[in-house]
Amino acid sequence: MEVSLQLYSIKEETNKDFKKAVEQVSKIGFKGVEFAGYGGLNAEELKALLEENNLYSVGTHTGLQVFENSFEEELELNKVIGSKYIICPYAEVDTKEKVDHLVKLLNTAAEKAAKENIKIGYHNHAHEFVKIDGKFPLDMIAENTSDNVILELDVFWVAYAGIDPVEYIKKWGKKVELIHMKQIDTLKANVDMGDGIIDMKNVKEASAYAKYFVLEHEEYDKPVWDSINNDFDYLNKIK
């Protein structure tokens, strides 16, 4: 399993020194990164930073307001840095009208991005598993978006909502091209890979159509780089 890193996992480090933090990601052994902000760098500077550290951009988390107001600029930046995906990381989906609005934005963006061989995705939390008229909003998103809109399934949040991540991955098959590998324990805390309850080997085996596995870690009971190293080693031992 080749594992990339969602840079939000090390936000305290990137806030201190973005370039130095990205260099450390490469030193650990990661080959890909997923952006959640650009550290004040422009497209050409980001491209150079990736090249200097032998990294590639899986994609970026881009706020809903960008999809609404400035998607063309975001698309151009991701074209320059070689991203495969542009992901909406969060949206309010507590009514059918809000789901419909999100679906329209994702489909419109996907039509534009397809011309640059970039796909659009949606990343879940737990609130997409609160039913509207008997259906999960995440199912509604998956059902009504085009083939160029994929799910980035965050297994932590699926489990947090009381859903089996493995079964949900199987349910949506080809729609699930990205997996956020993020561990949860019995108290619903985010923990190191070896300390949680999600069987990541089963997740990998179920993710038959996944193109990339992206590590995300947000809560720490030890130094950040210790946990990131632990998770990297753990996931790379999964065959």
Image (spheres, rainbow, N blue to C red):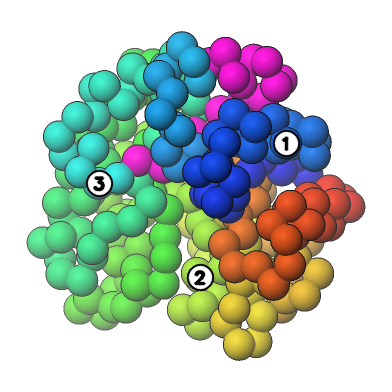
Q: Earlier in the sequence, mark 3 or mark 1?
A: 1
**Whether residue 85 is visible:** no
The answer to whether mark 3 and mark 1 are in CB contact below 8 A is no
Residue at left 34%, top 72%?
A: 127
Q: Find numbered disc 3 in the image and state the secondary structure of the residue it sits on.
A: helix
Which residue is disc 3 drawn over? 64
Q: Which residue is mark 1?
A: 24
Q: Amino acid at mark 2?
A: Val
Which span is picked out in magenta? 47-62
Relative height, residue 134 to residue 66 (above, below) = below
- Where, by quadrant of the figure, is residue 147 drawn? top left
**Residue drawn at the location 42% of the way across and 38% of the way down:** 37
**How many numbered marks are there?**
3
* Residue that sits furthest to the front in the current view: 16
How far apart are the two marked residues, 1 and 2, measured between alpha carbons? 30 Å
Mark 3 surroundings within 10 Å by alpha-carbon count, few (fewer than 14), some (14 through 19), many (20 or more):
some
Q: What residue did someone put label 2 on? A: 158
Residue 35 locus on image (x, y percent): 49, 37
SS for callout 1: helix
